[in-house]
């Protein structure tokens, strides 16, 4: 048996999953254990190693069980710490999922074949793989799989999405008037009722950025931001939770790992993170 440790370092939580793969089998791995701990930017590599050993011992597992490690992180200062721990504790350097790994190439279609999976990219190039992991919003996954099964259409299509305007800026007037109550997430409750949430992330707090200006990311609040302070404007899609939306999480095993395609959604699965 081989064992894969997956580590997702988010802004507020670190999610870990231990996947066991039967020896000499093409079957997809089974999630044997999973944990969630808080993200602490001041942690040392020794503290991280002690925490991991404790988690493994609590579940009756050994660090020597791990044959491979994959790490993704949205907190840059923590990545080298976890990489050092992986190399020392598991006697192998991890695969780091980040910039430089086939980025900037949109995937148009995923075609399943009896012994492989074909991935068609936006530049019309085609690539063959033994297995494919689709880690996107469920509506994006549904648009890639060609053709989707009836179950995939029903489960992946259960959650609708809406577009939200996002602005990266340095206009501190968007933050609360009293600086001592500034937080990573600052929610605005307007005098007039609105349908969409208006929130500003203080990136200096969220990402421990030491800078002379306050970098902010505001969601659905572009009309009150000083144009001189705008660094960039973006549009993102976010899920709308309603009755029937949890279908993907509850019925995930019905469609994931079938015909060499594995589905992972960062928003609704146990190993989700803030992305």
Image (cartoon, helix red, strand yellow):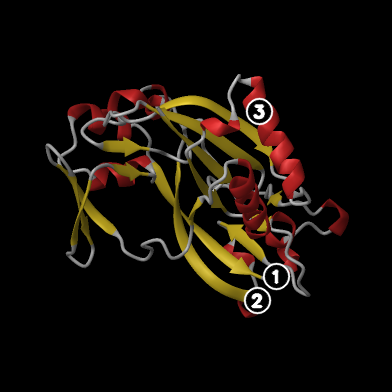
Q: Is residue 250 above or below residue 156?
A: above
Q: Is residue 186 above or below residue 23?
A: below
Q: Tag 3, which secondary structure? A: helix
The label number, if any, that marks residue 35 in the structure image: none
Q: Tag 1, which secondary structure? A: loop
Give x and y (percent) for residue 83.
60, 52
Q: Tag 2, which secondary structure? A: helix
Out of 225 and 94, give the one closest to the viewer.
94
Identify which residue is drawn at 64% across, 80% down.
228
Give x and y (percent) for residue 73.
57, 52
Identify which residue is drawn at 23% across, 55% down.
108
Which residue carries the number 2 mark?
229
Identify which residue is drawn at 45% across, 38% down.
240
Out of 267 and 26, give the one closest to the viewer.
26
Identify which residue is drawn at 63% across, 66% down.
224
> Which mark is nearer the camera, 3 or 2?
3
Out of 176 and 15, give the one closest to the viewer.
15
3 and 2 marks in contact (CB < 8 Å): no
Give x and y (percent) for residue 267.
48, 39
> Which mark is nearer the camera, 1 or 3?
3
The label number, if any, that marks residue 55 in the structure image: 3
User: Going by the picture, which residue comes out furthest to the left?
Assistant: 114
1 and 2 marks in contact (CB < 8 Å): yes
Which residue carries the number 1 mark?
171
Instruction: Say if residue 178 shows up in the picture.
Output: no
Quadrant (top left, top right, bottom left, bottom right) of the N terminus: top left
């Amino acid at each position: 048996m081989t064992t894969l440790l997956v580590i997702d370092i988010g802004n507020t939580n670190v999610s870990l999953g231990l996947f066991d793969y039967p020896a000499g089998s093409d079957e997809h791995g089974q999630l044997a254990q999973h944990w969630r701990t808080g993200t602490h930017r001041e942690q040392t590599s020794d503290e991280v190693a002690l925490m991991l050993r404790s988690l493994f011992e609590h579940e009756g597992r050994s660090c020597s069980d791990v044959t491979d490690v994959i790490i993704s992180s949205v907190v840059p200062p923590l990545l080298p710490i976890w990489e050092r721990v992986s190399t020392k504790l598991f006697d192998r350097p991890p695969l780091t999922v980040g910039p430089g790994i086939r980025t900037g190439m949109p995937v148009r279609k995923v075609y399943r074949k009896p012994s492989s999976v074909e991935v068609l990219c936006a530049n019309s190039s085609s690539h063959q793989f033994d297995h494919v992991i689709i880690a996107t919003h469920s509506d994006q996954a549904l648009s890639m799989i060609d053709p989707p099964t009836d179950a995939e259409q029903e489960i992946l299509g259960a959650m609708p999405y809406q577009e939200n305007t996002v602005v990266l800026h340095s206009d501190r007037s968007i933050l609360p008037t009293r600086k001592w109550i500034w937080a990573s997430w600052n929610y605005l409750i307007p005098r007039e009722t609105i349908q969409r949430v208006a929130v500003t992330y203080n990136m200096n707090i969220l990402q421990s950025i030491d800078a002379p200006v306050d970098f902010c990311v505001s969601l659905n609040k572009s009309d009150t931001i000083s144009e001189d302070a705008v660094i960039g404007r973006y549009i993102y899609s976010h899920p709308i939770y309603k009755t029937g939306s949890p279908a993907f999480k509850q019925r995930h095993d019905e469609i994931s790992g079938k015909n060499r395609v594995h589905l992972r959604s960062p928003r609704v699965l146990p190993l989700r993170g803030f992305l």
